[in-house]
Image (cartoon, rainbow, N blue to C red):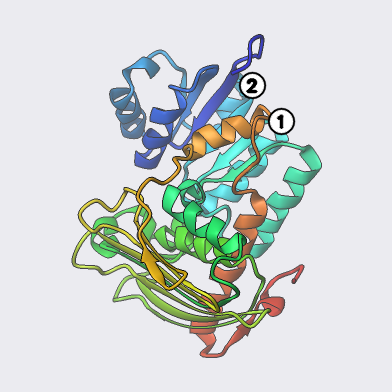
Amino acid sequence: MQEGQANIRVAMVGCGAVARWHASTLYRIPGVEIVALVDPSQENLNAMVKWIPQLSNVPTFSGPEEMFKAIGPDAVEICTPHTLHHEHVVMALEHGAHVLCEKPLACSVEHAQDIKQRAQDTGKVVMVSYQRRLDPGYNYIKNAITSGEIGDIQTISVICCQAWKKGTTGTWRQNPELSGGGMLMDSGSHLADVLLWLTSQPVESVYATVDNCDTPVDINSTSTIKFTNGTQAQFTVNGNLPITWIEEVLIIGTEGILKYESDPQHPWRTGRITHSKDGNLIQPLRLQMYSSPDEAWIAAIRGEGENPSPPDAGVRVAELTTAIYESARTGQAIKISDISPVGR
Protein backbone atom coordinates (compact mmCIF):
# COMPACT_ATOMS: atom_id res chain seq x y z
CA MET A 1 0.00 0.00 0.00
CA GLN A 2 1.38 3.41 -0.98
CA GLU A 3 1.54 6.15 1.63
CA GLY A 4 -1.61 8.26 1.69
CA GLN A 5 -3.65 5.66 -0.16
CA ALA A 6 -7.17 5.15 1.21
CA ASN A 7 -8.25 1.82 2.68
CA ILE A 8 -10.20 -0.51 0.41
CA ARG A 9 -13.45 -1.48 2.14
CA VAL A 10 -14.53 -5.00 1.14
CA ALA A 11 -17.83 -6.82 1.67
CA MET A 12 -17.90 -10.62 1.71
CA VAL A 13 -21.05 -11.85 -0.07
CA GLY A 14 -21.29 -15.52 0.84
CA CYS A 15 -19.50 -16.78 3.96
CA GLY A 16 -19.10 -20.51 3.35
CA ALA A 17 -15.86 -22.46 3.47
CA VAL A 18 -14.26 -20.92 0.37
CA ALA A 19 -15.13 -17.42 1.60
CA ARG A 20 -13.31 -18.13 4.86
CA TRP A 21 -10.23 -19.07 2.85
CA HIS A 22 -10.45 -15.77 0.94
CA ALA A 23 -11.10 -13.70 4.05
CA SER A 24 -8.12 -15.27 5.84
CA THR A 25 -5.87 -13.75 3.18
CA LEU A 26 -7.82 -10.57 2.62
CA TYR A 27 -7.89 -9.23 6.16
CA ARG A 28 -4.08 -9.52 6.40
CA ILE A 29 -3.46 -7.25 3.37
CA PRO A 30 -2.37 -3.78 4.55
CA GLY A 31 -4.94 -1.11 3.81
CA VAL A 32 -7.82 -3.56 3.34
CA GLU A 33 -10.81 -3.61 5.68
CA ILE A 34 -13.60 -6.20 5.66
CA VAL A 35 -16.71 -4.09 6.39
CA ALA A 36 -19.61 -6.51 5.88
CA LEU A 37 -20.41 -10.23 6.02
CA VAL A 38 -23.38 -11.42 3.98
CA ASP A 39 -24.98 -14.86 4.11
CA PRO A 40 -28.56 -16.15 4.63
CA SER A 41 -27.13 -18.83 6.93
CA GLN A 42 -26.41 -17.73 10.48
CA GLU A 43 -24.31 -20.87 10.81
CA ASN A 44 -22.01 -19.66 8.03
CA LEU A 45 -21.77 -16.20 9.56
CA ASN A 46 -20.87 -17.70 12.92
CA ALA A 47 -18.29 -19.98 11.30
CA MET A 48 -16.66 -17.00 9.59
CA VAL A 49 -16.25 -15.14 12.88
CA LYS A 50 -15.04 -18.28 14.64
CA TRP A 51 -12.46 -18.76 11.89
CA ILE A 52 -11.37 -15.10 12.01
CA PRO A 53 -12.21 -13.65 15.46
CA GLN A 54 -11.00 -10.21 14.32
CA LEU A 55 -14.24 -9.96 12.29
CA SER A 56 -16.50 -10.33 15.36
CA ASN A 57 -17.59 -6.66 15.23
CA VAL A 58 -18.17 -6.53 11.48
CA PRO A 59 -21.86 -5.96 10.54
CA THR A 60 -23.68 -9.04 9.22
CA PHE A 61 -26.53 -9.21 6.72
CA SER A 62 -28.78 -11.96 5.38
CA GLY A 63 -28.70 -10.65 1.80
CA PRO A 64 -26.71 -8.29 -0.46
CA GLU A 65 -29.62 -5.88 -1.02
CA GLU A 66 -29.77 -5.16 2.70
CA MET A 67 -26.01 -4.79 2.87
CA PHE A 68 -25.76 -2.32 -0.01
CA LYS A 69 -28.42 -0.12 1.61
CA ALA A 70 -26.41 0.08 4.82
CA ILE A 71 -22.79 -0.16 3.63
CA GLY A 72 -21.07 1.41 0.65
CA PRO A 73 -18.20 -1.02 0.03
CA ASP A 74 -15.45 -0.20 -2.44
CA ALA A 75 -15.19 -3.85 -3.44
CA VAL A 76 -17.08 -7.12 -3.05
CA GLU A 77 -15.94 -10.73 -2.94
CA ILE A 78 -18.68 -13.07 -4.21
CA CYS A 79 -18.63 -16.64 -2.89
CA THR A 80 -22.27 -17.62 -3.37
CA PRO A 81 -23.78 -20.61 -5.23
CA HIS A 82 -22.96 -20.53 -8.92
CA THR A 83 -26.34 -19.58 -10.37
CA LEU A 84 -26.41 -16.47 -8.15
CA HIS A 85 -23.08 -15.13 -9.42
CA HIS A 86 -24.47 -13.09 -12.31
CA GLU A 87 -27.09 -11.39 -10.15
CA HIS A 88 -24.61 -10.59 -7.41
CA VAL A 89 -21.84 -9.36 -9.73
CA VAL A 90 -24.29 -7.09 -11.55
CA MET A 91 -25.61 -5.76 -8.24
CA ALA A 92 -22.09 -4.98 -7.04
CA LEU A 93 -21.20 -3.17 -10.27
CA GLU A 94 -24.41 -1.17 -10.13
CA HIS A 95 -23.35 -0.01 -6.67
CA GLY A 96 -19.94 1.06 -7.95
CA ALA A 97 -17.90 -1.78 -6.44
CA HIS A 98 -14.98 -3.79 -7.78
CA VAL A 99 -15.58 -7.56 -7.81
CA LEU A 100 -13.68 -10.76 -7.12
CA CYS A 101 -15.99 -13.63 -8.07
CA GLU A 102 -15.44 -17.28 -7.26
CA LYS A 103 -15.57 -19.61 -10.22
CA PRO A 104 -17.46 -19.89 -12.44
CA LEU A 105 -18.07 -16.25 -13.33
CA ALA A 106 -21.49 -17.27 -14.64
CA CYS A 107 -23.36 -20.41 -15.64
CA SER A 108 -24.27 -19.26 -19.14
CA VAL A 109 -22.38 -17.61 -21.99
CA GLU A 110 -24.93 -14.79 -22.15
CA HIS A 111 -24.53 -13.95 -18.45
CA ALA A 112 -20.73 -14.10 -18.65
CA GLN A 113 -20.69 -11.78 -21.65
CA ASP A 114 -23.08 -9.41 -19.88
CA ILE A 115 -20.67 -9.17 -16.93
CA LYS A 116 -17.74 -8.60 -19.28
CA GLN A 117 -19.58 -5.72 -20.96
CA ARG A 118 -20.65 -4.17 -17.65
CA ALA A 119 -17.08 -4.33 -16.36
CA GLN A 120 -15.90 -2.51 -19.47
CA ASP A 121 -18.66 0.10 -19.18
CA THR A 122 -18.03 0.81 -15.48
CA GLY A 123 -14.25 0.58 -15.51
CA LYS A 124 -14.35 -1.55 -12.37
CA VAL A 125 -11.97 -4.45 -11.78
CA VAL A 126 -13.86 -7.73 -12.15
CA MET A 127 -11.69 -10.77 -11.54
CA VAL A 128 -12.51 -14.48 -11.56
CA SER A 129 -10.80 -16.44 -8.77
CA TYR A 130 -8.82 -18.79 -11.00
CA GLN A 131 -5.85 -19.23 -8.69
CA ARG A 132 -3.90 -21.54 -10.99
CA ARG A 133 -3.02 -18.48 -13.03
CA LEU A 134 -1.01 -17.48 -9.96
CA ASP A 135 0.46 -20.93 -9.26
CA PRO A 136 4.28 -21.16 -9.56
CA GLY A 137 4.19 -24.43 -11.51
CA TYR A 138 1.58 -23.31 -14.00
CA ASN A 139 3.39 -20.00 -14.50
CA TYR A 140 6.59 -21.88 -15.31
CA ILE A 141 4.63 -23.80 -17.97
CA LYS A 142 2.92 -20.66 -19.30
CA ASN A 143 6.23 -18.81 -19.60
CA ALA A 144 7.88 -21.78 -21.34
CA ILE A 145 5.05 -21.91 -23.88
CA THR A 146 5.03 -18.15 -24.46
CA SER A 147 8.80 -18.04 -24.96
CA GLY A 148 8.54 -20.76 -27.63
CA GLU A 149 10.62 -23.33 -25.72
CA ILE A 150 8.43 -26.25 -26.83
CA GLY A 151 7.52 -24.88 -30.24
CA ASP A 152 3.88 -25.02 -31.33
CA ILE A 153 1.45 -26.95 -29.15
CA GLN A 154 0.27 -30.08 -30.97
CA THR A 155 -1.80 -31.75 -28.26
CA ILE A 156 -2.71 -31.05 -24.65
CA SER A 157 -4.27 -33.42 -22.14
CA VAL A 158 -5.87 -32.09 -18.94
CA ILE A 159 -7.08 -34.39 -16.15
CA CYS A 160 -9.03 -33.16 -13.13
CA CYS A 161 -10.18 -35.78 -10.61
CA GLN A 162 -11.66 -35.39 -7.13
CA ALA A 163 -13.76 -37.25 -4.57
CA TRP A 164 -16.39 -34.65 -5.46
CA LYS A 165 -19.51 -36.83 -5.55
CA LYS A 166 -18.99 -38.08 -2.02
CA GLY A 167 -17.93 -34.69 -0.67
CA THR A 168 -20.89 -32.75 -2.10
CA THR A 169 -23.76 -35.18 -1.40
CA GLY A 170 -26.60 -33.34 0.29
CA THR A 171 -25.19 -29.88 -0.48
CA TRP A 172 -26.23 -27.13 -2.90
CA ARG A 173 -23.47 -28.25 -5.28
CA GLN A 174 -25.65 -31.20 -6.33
CA ASN A 175 -28.74 -29.01 -6.72
CA PRO A 176 -28.77 -27.84 -10.37
CA GLU A 177 -30.92 -24.80 -9.53
CA LEU A 178 -28.08 -23.46 -7.39
CA SER A 179 -24.98 -25.11 -8.85
CA GLY A 180 -25.78 -24.84 -12.57
CA GLY A 181 -23.99 -28.16 -13.06
CA GLY A 182 -21.76 -30.67 -11.33
CA MET A 183 -18.05 -31.40 -11.11
CA LEU A 184 -17.37 -29.73 -14.49
CA MET A 185 -19.06 -26.48 -13.44
CA ASP A 186 -17.37 -26.57 -10.03
CA SER A 187 -13.80 -27.85 -9.60
CA GLY A 188 -13.56 -28.63 -13.30
CA SER A 189 -13.95 -24.93 -14.06
CA HIS A 190 -10.42 -24.30 -12.78
CA LEU A 191 -8.90 -26.82 -15.19
CA ALA A 192 -11.07 -25.64 -18.07
CA ASP A 193 -9.50 -22.24 -17.52
CA VAL A 194 -6.01 -23.77 -17.35
CA LEU A 195 -6.59 -25.45 -20.71
CA LEU A 196 -7.78 -22.23 -22.35
CA TRP A 197 -5.16 -20.01 -20.68
CA LEU A 198 -2.20 -22.21 -21.61
CA THR A 199 -3.23 -22.67 -25.24
CA SER A 200 -4.33 -19.03 -25.74
CA GLN A 201 -6.32 -20.12 -28.78
CA PRO A 202 -10.05 -19.96 -29.55
CA VAL A 203 -11.94 -23.26 -29.37
CA GLU A 204 -13.49 -24.35 -32.66
CA SER A 205 -15.49 -27.45 -31.67
CA VAL A 206 -16.16 -29.88 -28.83
CA TYR A 207 -17.35 -33.48 -28.64
CA ALA A 208 -18.13 -34.76 -25.15
CA THR A 209 -19.75 -37.48 -23.08
CA VAL A 210 -21.10 -37.01 -19.54
CA ASP A 211 -22.08 -39.44 -16.76
CA ASN A 212 -24.16 -38.21 -13.81
CA CYS A 213 -23.48 -41.39 -11.81
CA ASP A 214 -27.08 -41.50 -10.54
CA THR A 215 -27.02 -37.91 -9.26
CA PRO A 216 -28.86 -34.78 -10.50
CA VAL A 217 -25.62 -33.31 -11.92
CA ASP A 218 -22.63 -34.33 -14.00
CA ILE A 219 -19.93 -36.26 -12.15
CA ASN A 220 -17.65 -37.56 -14.92
CA SER A 221 -17.04 -36.07 -18.36
CA THR A 222 -14.61 -36.59 -21.22
CA SER A 223 -14.22 -34.00 -23.97
CA THR A 224 -12.30 -33.90 -27.22
CA ILE A 225 -11.57 -30.30 -28.17
CA LYS A 226 -10.31 -28.80 -31.41
CA PHE A 227 -8.82 -25.30 -31.45
CA THR A 228 -8.97 -23.00 -34.46
CA ASN A 229 -5.20 -23.33 -35.05
CA GLY A 230 -5.45 -27.13 -35.22
CA THR A 231 -4.30 -27.91 -31.67
CA GLN A 232 -6.12 -30.92 -30.22
CA ALA A 233 -7.04 -31.38 -26.56
CA GLN A 234 -8.46 -34.05 -24.29
CA PHE A 235 -10.19 -32.79 -21.13
CA THR A 236 -11.12 -35.43 -18.54
CA VAL A 237 -13.08 -34.64 -15.39
CA ASN A 238 -13.77 -37.37 -12.83
CA GLY A 239 -15.78 -36.52 -9.72
CA ASN A 240 -15.98 -40.06 -8.34
CA LEU A 241 -12.33 -40.50 -7.35
CA PRO A 242 -11.48 -43.01 -4.57
CA ILE A 243 -8.80 -40.61 -3.20
CA THR A 244 -8.77 -36.84 -2.65
CA TRP A 245 -7.40 -35.28 -5.83
CA ILE A 246 -5.48 -35.90 -9.06
CA GLU A 247 -4.48 -33.10 -11.42
CA GLU A 248 -2.33 -33.62 -14.49
CA VAL A 249 -1.54 -31.61 -17.60
CA LEU A 250 0.56 -32.93 -20.50
CA ILE A 251 1.50 -30.58 -23.33
CA ILE A 252 3.30 -31.93 -26.40
CA GLY A 253 4.86 -29.31 -28.63
CA THR A 254 6.77 -29.58 -31.86
CA GLU A 255 10.06 -29.07 -29.98
CA GLY A 256 9.45 -30.20 -26.42
CA ILE A 257 7.12 -31.46 -23.70
CA LEU A 258 5.75 -29.96 -20.48
CA LYS A 259 3.98 -31.87 -17.73
CA TYR A 260 2.28 -30.84 -14.48
CA GLU A 261 1.46 -33.44 -11.81
CA SER A 262 -0.18 -32.78 -8.46
CA ASP A 263 0.85 -34.68 -5.34
CA PRO A 264 -2.19 -36.77 -4.24
CA GLN A 265 -1.00 -36.54 -0.62
CA HIS A 266 -0.65 -32.74 -0.76
CA PRO A 267 -2.99 -31.72 -3.58
CA TRP A 268 -3.14 -28.01 -2.72
CA ARG A 269 0.61 -27.43 -3.13
CA THR A 270 2.03 -26.51 -6.51
CA GLY A 271 2.60 -29.58 -8.66
CA ARG A 272 5.75 -31.23 -9.98
CA ILE A 273 6.91 -29.92 -13.35
CA THR A 274 8.69 -32.02 -15.97
CA HIS A 275 10.18 -30.14 -18.92
CA SER A 276 11.74 -31.80 -21.95
CA LYS A 277 14.40 -29.34 -23.11
CA ASP A 278 17.40 -29.76 -25.42
CA GLY A 279 17.14 -33.54 -25.24
CA ASN A 280 17.05 -33.57 -21.43
CA LEU A 281 14.28 -33.96 -18.87
CA ILE A 282 14.33 -31.13 -16.33
CA GLN A 283 12.35 -30.86 -13.09
CA PRO A 284 12.60 -27.23 -11.90
CA LEU A 285 12.48 -26.92 -8.11
CA ARG A 286 12.99 -23.26 -7.22
CA LEU A 287 9.91 -21.78 -8.82
CA GLN A 288 8.97 -18.13 -8.52
CA MET A 289 6.23 -17.54 -5.96
CA TYR A 290 3.14 -15.58 -6.97
CA SER A 291 0.40 -13.83 -5.01
CA SER A 292 -3.01 -15.14 -3.95
CA PRO A 293 -6.13 -14.20 -5.94
CA ASP A 294 -7.09 -11.74 -3.20
CA GLU A 295 -3.70 -10.04 -3.24
CA ALA A 296 -3.69 -9.87 -7.05
CA TRP A 297 -7.21 -8.40 -7.07
CA ILE A 298 -6.34 -5.69 -4.54
CA ALA A 299 -3.17 -4.85 -6.50
CA ALA A 300 -5.24 -4.52 -9.70
CA ILE A 301 -7.73 -2.21 -7.94
CA ARG A 302 -4.83 -0.03 -6.75
CA GLY A 303 -3.30 0.04 -10.22
CA GLU A 304 -0.25 -1.85 -8.97
CA GLY A 305 -0.69 -4.89 -11.22
CA GLU A 306 -2.72 -6.35 -14.05
CA ASN A 307 -5.92 -8.31 -13.55
CA PRO A 308 -4.69 -11.92 -13.99
CA SER A 309 -8.12 -13.41 -14.77
CA PRO A 310 -10.48 -10.78 -16.23
CA PRO A 311 -14.09 -11.44 -17.27
CA ASP A 312 -13.03 -12.75 -20.68
CA ALA A 313 -11.59 -15.79 -18.88
CA GLY A 314 -15.06 -16.43 -17.47
CA VAL A 315 -16.65 -16.00 -20.90
CA ARG A 316 -14.34 -18.55 -22.51
CA VAL A 317 -14.91 -21.08 -19.74
CA ALA A 318 -18.68 -20.58 -20.05
CA GLU A 319 -18.44 -21.21 -23.79
CA LEU A 320 -16.46 -24.41 -23.32
CA THR A 321 -18.64 -25.68 -20.46
CA THR A 322 -21.84 -24.98 -22.40
CA ALA A 323 -20.45 -26.75 -25.47
CA ILE A 324 -19.51 -29.81 -23.38
CA TYR A 325 -23.00 -30.07 -21.88
CA GLU A 326 -24.68 -29.52 -25.24
CA SER A 327 -22.51 -32.09 -26.99
CA ALA A 328 -23.27 -34.67 -24.30
CA ARG A 329 -26.99 -33.88 -24.57
CA THR A 330 -27.17 -34.14 -28.36
CA GLY A 331 -24.44 -36.70 -29.05
CA GLN A 332 -23.01 -34.32 -31.65
CA ALA A 333 -19.89 -32.22 -31.98
CA ILE A 334 -20.69 -28.60 -31.08
CA LYS A 335 -19.13 -25.53 -32.65
CA ILE A 336 -18.47 -22.66 -30.28
CA SER A 337 -19.83 -20.26 -32.89
CA ASP A 338 -23.20 -22.02 -32.60
CA ILE A 339 -23.58 -21.59 -28.82
CA SER A 340 -22.01 -18.19 -28.23
CA PRO A 341 -24.32 -15.16 -28.73
CA VAL A 342 -21.29 -13.18 -29.90
CA GLY A 343 -19.18 -15.96 -31.38
CA ARG A 344 -15.46 -15.91 -32.01
Give the alpha-carbon distance from disc 1 to disc 2, as whole Å. Answer: 9 Å
Q: Residues within 10 Å of mark 2 (few under 14, many from 20)?
A: some
Residue bearing the label numbered 1: 96
Kindly identify the residue that appears in the image at 64 percent across and 14 percent down: 6
Residue at disc 2, secondary structure: loop
Residue at disc 1, secondary structure: loop
Q: Amino acid at mark 1?
A: Gly
Q: Quadrant of the C terminus?
A: bottom right
Residue 182 can be seen, yes or no:
yes
Mark 1–mark 2 CB contact (< 8 Å): yes
Residue 242 position, x and y percent, is 19, 67
Q: Residues within 10 Å of mark 1 (few under 14, many from 20)?
A: some
Give the number of the disc on residue 35: none
The one nearer the camera, 49 or 269, is 269
Identity of the residue furthest to the top in this view: 4
Residue bearing the label numbered 2: 72
Q: Is residue 340 above or below residue 328?
A: above
The tally of labels here is 2
